[in-house]
Image (tube, helix red, strand yellow):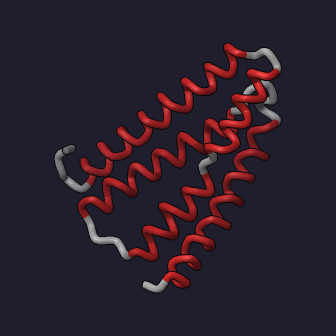
Amino acid sequence: MTHLSAFFWVALGGALGAGARYAVSLALISHAPRFPFATLTVNIIGSFLLGLLLAYTQQQSVADSWRLFIGVGLLGAFTTFSTFSVEVVSMMAQGELAKAMLHVGLNVILCVAAVVVAMMLMNSLLNISVK
């Protein structure tokens, strides 16, 4: 695969992932205006899906174009560490330390748990024992 081809797949996935993230934000912003649930939601979903992809690609052959499109582009743009970081700093600057720490804790614990659960699920679906 050429660098130009790889760039195309990442860019295409990134456009779709960013659009999907924006759609989730629009859907959730009115439901929870005092806590960044949209960021938490996309990070958990993205972590889960990336965990599925990781477990699958560890056992099955996947074309580089698909791995780049889904893993780097789509899920890379769907999840958002930078927005999460800005939200935490903003909460801290507003004196909402407890809310900021809750956001950090929930993102770290739930996203890591989502990867573990996804990998276990995929390995189970592929009838492979977890390593």
Q: Position of residue 4 (x, y in %)?
A: 55, 84
Name the residue rendered at 79%, 22% in the picture.
Answer: 93
Q: 124 or 42, which lies in front?
A: 42
Give the answer, above or below, for where 124 lies relative to 109: below
Q: Position of residue 31 (x, y in %)?
A: 78, 32
Q: Position of residue 87 (x, y in %)?
A: 73, 33
**Going by the image, does 77 lie left or right of 23?**
left
Give the answer, above or below, for where 19 lies relative to 110: below
**Going by the image, does 78 lie left or right of 46?**
right
Q: Position of residue 80 (x, y in %)?
A: 63, 47
Q: 4 or 64, which lies in front?
A: 4
Q: 86 or 107, which lies in front?
A: 86
Number of numbered discs present? Answer: 0
Quarter placement of the C terminus: top left
Rendering quarter of residue 1 = bottom left
Name the residue rendered at 19%, 52% in the picture.
Answer: 127
**Going by the image, does 47 lie left or right of 104?**
left
Q: 75 or 82, which lies in front?
A: 82
Rendering quarter of residue 15 = bottom right
Name the residue rendered at 56%, 32% in the picture.
Answer: 107
**Going by the image, does 26 lie left or right of 98?**
right
Name the residue rendered at 67%, 14% in the picture.
Answer: 98
